[in-house]
Image (cartoon, rainbow, N blue to C red):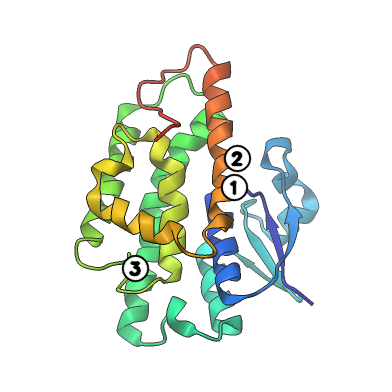
């Protein structure tokens, strides 16, 4: 039986898991969880995941939450090529660092900004939050000064997390991503991967949601939001 992924396609962490599954050739059964109507707060979902977040993986009764943990699990169990999550201790430690960086800094800082725009009706984004997100992008640029990909010289699951986060948070940056040459070169390589479409489909929908929110809220401070980035 194929593992089941509880998801919403616009979620960056969900898209990273979809990229990972496609890369290792695992078919996932998908169940949509509509955050906008509160599916994630329904009792049956909270029983699986008290954190009420997506994605959630159900692999024959084994429940796992958090995209980073899900990807490492999928590669470890189903991946014939372990390079996406290396078994070498030092290489894996670097991947783990980048995953933790995404969950605690890169994704987290962008989520605070985007959540306030999409779910909380924010009229203005505090400059401090925008500065913190911009700082996180600068850190990624520095990571890529040393390696071709975010955790080494080949693609790993850390790249899946970074690419979904960065492409989703780009509209909230004061400058376009092309101002970061290392990130730009890395993004070009990522977009050439045969499974990158798993990010693009949901990303297009996500950016449209942001654009619609901006258009429908005349009072929103738009000076740092650019959906054409």
In the image, what residue occupies the spot 58% across and 57% down?
198
In the image, what residue occupies the spot 48% across and 12% down?
219
The earlier-in-sequence mark between 1 and 3 is 3
Which mark identifies residue 202? Answer: 1
In the image, what residue occupies the spot 67% across and 66% down?
57
Residue 66 in view (yes/no): no
Looking at the image, do the residues carrying marks 2 and 1 touch, with CB atoms under 8 Å apart? Answer: yes
Q: Is 177 positioned to the left or the right of 194 in the image?
A: left
Q: Secondary structure at mark 3?
A: helix
Q: Nearer the viewer, mark 2 or mark 3?
A: 2
Q: Label 3, on which residue?
A: 97
Quadrant location of the C terminus in the rendered image:
top left
Depicted 31 relative to depicted 91: above or below: above
In the image, what residue occupies the spot 47% across and 53% down?
164
Q: Secondary structure at mark 2?
A: helix
Q: Secondary structure at mark 1?
A: helix
Give neighbour class at mark 3: few <14, some 14-19, many 20+ (Cα, 10 Å): some
Quadrant location of the N terminus in the rendered image:
bottom right
- Closer-to-camera residue (18/59): 18
Depicted 189 relative to depicted 115: above or below: below
The earlier-in-sequence mark between 2 and 3 is 3
Residue 39 place in picture, x, y as percent:
74, 45
Q: CA distance from mark 1 to mark 3?
A: 26 Å
Q: Label 2, on which residue?
A: 205
Q: CA distance from mark 2 to mark 3?
A: 30 Å
Residue 188 in view (yes/no): yes
């Amino acid at each position: 039986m194929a593992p089941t992924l509880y998801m919403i396609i616009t979620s960056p962490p969900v898209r990273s898991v979809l990229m990972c599954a496609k890369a290792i050739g695992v078919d996932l059964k998908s169940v949509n969880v509509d955050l906008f109507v509160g599916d994630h707060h329904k009792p049956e979902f909270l029983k699986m995941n008290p954190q009420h977040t997506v994605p959630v993986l159900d692999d024959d009764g084994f429940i796992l939450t958090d995209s980073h943990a899900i990807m490492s699990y999928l590669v470890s169990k189903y991946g014939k090529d372990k390079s996406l999550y290396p078994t070498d201790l030092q290489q894996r430690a670097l991947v783990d660092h980048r995953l933790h960086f995404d969950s605690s800094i890169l994704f987290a800082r962008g989520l605070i900004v985007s959540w306030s725009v999409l779910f909380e009706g924010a009229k203005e984004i505090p400059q401090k939050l925008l500065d913190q997100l911009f700082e996180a992008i600068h850190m990624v640029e520095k990571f890529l000064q040393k390696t071709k990909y975010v955790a080494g010289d080949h693609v790993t699951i850390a790249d899946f997390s970074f690419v979904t986060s960065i492409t989703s948070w780009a509209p909230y940056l004061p400058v376009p991503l092309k101002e970061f040459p290392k990130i730009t070169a890395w993004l070009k390589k990522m977009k050439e991967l045969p499974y990158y479409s798993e990010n693009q489909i949901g990303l297009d929908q996500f950016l449209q949601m942001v654009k619609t929110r901006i258009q429908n809220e005349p009072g929103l401070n738009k000076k740092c939001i650019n959906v054409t980035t």
